[in-house]
Each structure stands twice: as structure tokens, then as C-alpha cells.
């Protein structure tokens, strides 16, 4: 869920608005970027929480059990979804933390590029 509107959230939002406003963005533009970043972080946290709940529900504990469970489903999935089936043969990829960081990097690079190009209005 959304975090409560408390003093820490207000201080953090003010700091982000200050940083973005210093680049020449007006407050509505700066706030839209703050909200974009917030949505990414909150969505990643919610997705990770849901994933962990699902793993607990099915009794999957640890990477080894997850890999085994994915491999068990592979034949069913691979017939209609060959690329996904190929991944399921050896499921690997970035951790949730790495995915969060990668997404933030993409967003921040995009924001910086739009500001530099003078096309910052979302």
C-alpha cells in the first residue's frame, strides 16, 4: 500500500523536488517525475511481496526449490511459449534488488536525457 504522509516522506519529497527544480523544471513537472519514481519503487516492493507470499503459499523455500518447480512446469509451458520454455530450462536473471536498480537507472537516465534535451514535460 501507499506509505503514510509523514515527516520522512515530506522531507524526501521536498529534497527530490529541490533537486529536480534546480535543473529548471517547474514544480508540476518535477512532481510528475517524483511520482514516476515513487510508482516504480512501490510497484517493485509490492511485486516482490506478492512473489514472496506466493512462494510461501506453495512451500517453495530457496532458489533450488524455485528452479525445480519452474523446471517441472517447463514442458507444459514450452509447447505454446518456446522462449519462456527455454528460459525455464535454466531460470536465471537479475535479483529483485538488481531489477529495481536497473529500472531506476532507466528512469533516471530518461529524466536526465529529457531535461538535457529541453523536452522534460512528461
Image (cartoon, grey):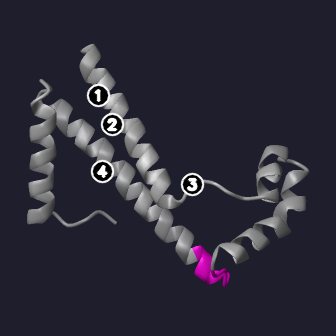
Q: Is residue 13 above or below residue 62?
A: above
Q: Gap in Å between the C-alphas at discs 1 and 3?
A: 24 Å
> Which comes before the other along the chain, label 4 or label 2?
4
Q: Gap in Å between the C-alphas at discs 2 and 3?
A: 19 Å
Across and down, in percent, residue 13 comes to 15, 50
Which of pointers 2 and 3 indicates the residue nearer the eye? Answer: 3
Q: Gap in Å between the C-alphas at discs 1 and 2?
A: 6 Å
Which of pointers 1 and 4 indicates the residue nearer the eye? Answer: 1
Instruction: Say the numbered circle drawn on residue 38.
Output: 4
Q: Residue at x 50, y 60 (%)?
A: 96
For the record, the magenta segment spans 54-61
> Label 2, on which residue?
108
> Which comes before the other along the chain, label 2 or label 3?
3
Which of pointers 4 and 3 indicates the residue nearer the eye? Answer: 3
Q: Gap in Å between the C-alphas at discs 4 and 3?
A: 21 Å
Quadrant housing residue 104: top left
55 drawn magenta: yes
Amino acid at each position: 500500500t501507499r506509505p503514510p504522509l509523514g515527516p520522512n516522506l515530506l522531507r524526501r519529497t521536498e529534497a527530490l523536488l529541490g533537486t529536480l527544480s534546480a535543473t529548471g523544471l517547474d514544480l508540476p513537472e518535477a512532481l510528475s517525475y517524483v511520482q514516476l519514481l515513487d510508482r516504480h519503487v512501490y510497484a517493485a516492493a509490492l511485486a516482490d511481496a506478492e512473489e514472496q507470499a506466493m512462494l510461501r503459499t506453495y512451500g517453495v523455500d530457496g532458489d533450488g526449490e524455485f528452479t525445480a518447480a519452474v523446471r517441472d512446469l517447463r514442458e507444459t509451458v514450452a509447447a505454446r511459449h518456446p522462449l519462456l520454455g527455454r528460459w525455464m530450462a535454466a531460470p536465471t536473471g537479475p535479483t529483485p534488488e538488481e531489477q529495481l536498480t536497473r529500472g531506476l537507472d532507466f528512469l533516471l537516465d530518461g529524466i536526465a536525457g529529457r531535461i538535457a534535451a529541453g523536452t522534460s514535460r512528461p
